[in-house]
Amino acid sequence: MFLSKTLLKRHSVLPGFDLALGFAVLYLCLVVLIPLSAVFLKTFTMTWAAFWDTVSSPRVMASYRLTFGTSLAAALVNAVFGLLVAWVLVRYEFPLKRIVDALVDLPFALPTAVAGIALTALYAPNGWIGAMLPFKVAFTPLGVFVALTFIGLPFVVRTVQPILEDLQKELEEAAATLGATRLQTFRMVILPTLLPALLTGFSLAFARALGEYGSVIFIAGNMPMVSEITPLLIITKLEQYDYAGATAIATVMLVISFLLLLAINTLQAWARKRQGR
């Protein structure tokens, strides 16, 4: 007990533990807990029958499948290709490398509406890319997947990149001298080290994709039962002054998203614990 009190009272550039904790909790309450509690409180004004009818209607269920399915698929693709992009940026030197590195952050800086318009112009049937494809991308669920992949890539790259930079090449050389193939070196030496960061980037990309709105509505087409995302349904409910219906759908999104992210974080903690061994 004495040791813990001593550690808490040691000198720091930040305020004392009690004051810092108080500010942290206050900030979290103002920014996160109070708005989320307002969503739940508004939902509780509905009867169970009205709540169930709202969140389980065929149109809403179709939007759940599209939103969660495309978000998961986009996050998985970004986990693979984000790792590849980070590997190229860290391990190789090539012309215009700094420009390519800066382009990774473009989805962060670009307004989502601008990104949606640009993607629609590219992948529309008469667009530069869409005109060359034998299938339709814009105004379909595939267009939603493209938009979510675009906005989620930087999360994986920027999470994995620092770990790759700190990864010691001597470990790979030692594995090679012991007769390990490239695949064995990646699977047994590199991947265990990168796995926690890769899971973090995946969860960030997945969480961002779940709530994405601006870049999706232009390229999706917003056709009910086909390419209509859940955030758009929430906006539609608000425009119709159906606040309880909007918060009901938002509550379901929050609960499912929390459970999925909790599972991912648990897996990430397990990976870090295994790596520590």
Image (tube, rainbow, N blue to C red):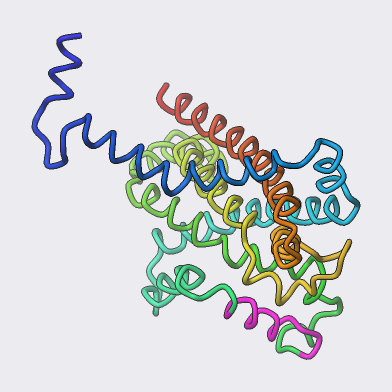
In terms of depth relative to the viewer, which is nearer, 123 or 195? 123
Query: At 41% across and 70% down in the image, what residue appears?
Result: 101
**101 left or right of 78 in image:** left
Task: Please state, as top left, top right, bottom left or bottom right, where the C terminus lies in the image.
Answer: top left
Q: Position of residue 208 (x, y in %)?
A: 57, 56
Q: Quadrant of residue 22?
A: top left
Task: Please state, as top left, top right, bottom left or bottom right, where the N terminus lies in the image.
Answer: top left
Q: Residue 274, relative to residue 236: is it above or below?
A: above
Query: At 80% across and 56% down in the image, what residue appears?
Result: 63
In terms of depth relative to the viewer, which is nearer, 179 or 28? 28
In terms of depth relative to the viewer, which is nearer, 22 or 159? 22
Residue 46 colored in magenta in the image: no
Q: Which residues are magenta?
A: 114-126
Q: Residue 89, relative to residue 83: is it above or below?
A: below
Query: At 49% across and 29% down in the image, what residue appears?
Result: 269
Q: Position of residue 140 (x, y in %)?
A: 82, 70
Residue at the top extreme? 1
**119 left or right of 17 in image:** right
Query: At 44% across and 33% down in the image, what residue appears?
Result: 178
Q: Count every numbered label the image shows and give the total.
A: 0
**268 left or right of 55 in image:** left
Q: Position of residue 248 (x, y in %)?
A: 73, 46
In terms of depth relative to the viewer, which is nearer, 33 or 224? 33
Residue at the front extreme? 45
Q: Position of residue 17 (x, y in %)?
A: 21, 30
Prevailing secondary structure class for the magenta stretch in the rendered image: helix
Q: Quadrant of residue 228?
A: bottom right
Residue 123 colored in magenta in the image: yes
